[in-house]
Amino acid sequence: MKYQIIGKNIEVTEGIKQAVESKLARMDKYFVINEDVTCRVVVRSYKVGAKVEVTIFTPNMDFRAEVMNADLYAGVDLAIDKLEGQMRKLKTRMDRSRGGKLSLGKALALEAIEDLPPEEDEEDTVVRTKSKYLDPMTVEEAIARMEAIGHPFFLYLDEEDDKISVVYQRDDGGYGIFQAENELR
């Protein structure tokens, strides 16, 4: 796995780099290690505590965890625990759907991930499905509608390029947009 460690408001010393890489090395067992798997770690220092963002990019899926903690090294451990939880949840879902034969197995070594106990996974049940005709609109109109209904995201059809898009509120302020690359039929 290739590592990219970035410091914001903090200098990434050789000691920090080695500690982060050695802690993240325990994640290697979950991936088919090759040049396509990259891990980016962003550490930010604040007056009180530190924030650690770990993102693992694989050819088929990205995993991300973000943790605030008073101790940088403890934050890295907590972020890794979160990532392992995401992987357990994913493996459990994959085992249930299509007999566990989704294409994600090309990038992940899923046999190394433990299944979730059944009682921890009950919250993943779909309890409601909605359908909606997507009206073409501008980003500004989508943001206004999102704020009007009080949701953290809003699905719409982008007026400029006819792509299905989702506008969302970012944790650090501002808005973000997800846009589907598929062409409408």
Image (tube, rainbow, N blue to C red):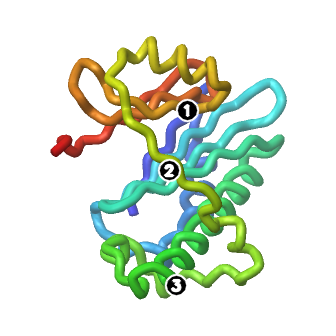
Image: 110 above or below 84: below
Which quarter of the figure has residue 157?
top left
Of mark 3 and mark 1, the one earlier in the sequence is: 3
Residue drawn at 71 percent across, 72 percent down:
122
Residue under the point 51% across and 37% down: 6
Residue 10 visible (yes or no): no
Q: Residues within 10 Å of mark 3 (few under 14, many from 20)?
A: some
Front residue (pair 178, 71): 178
The front one of 139 and 127 is 127
Structural distance between the alpha carbons of marks 3 and 2: 19 Å
Which tag is nearer the camera, tag 1 or tag 2?
A: 1
**Under tag 2, what secondary structure?**
strand
Name which residue lies at 54% across and 68% down. 25
List x then y, in percent, for residue 7. Answer: 56, 34
Whether label 1 touches label 2, CB < 8 Å: no
Q: Secondary structure at mark 3?
A: helix
The image shows residue 102 at horizontal and vertical percentages of 35, 76
User: Looking at the image, is 97 positioned above or below residue 173?
Assistant: below
Tell me if residue 1 comes above or below residue 66 in the rendering. Answer: below
Amino acid type, callout 2:
Thr
The numbered disc on residue 112 is 3
Residue at mark 1: 153
Q: How many marks?
A: 3
The part of the image, by quadrant, that contains residue 144 is top right
**Which comes before the other along the chain, label 3 or label 2?**
2
Amino acid tagged 1: Phe
**Mark 3 touching mark 2, by CB under 8 A?**
no
> In what element is the residue under mark 1?
strand
Q: Quadrant of the N terminus?
A: bottom left
Find disc 2 in the rendering and name its residue.
55
How far is mark 3 from mark 1, CA to CA? 34 Å
Would residue 111 be found to the left or right of residue 151 on screen?
left
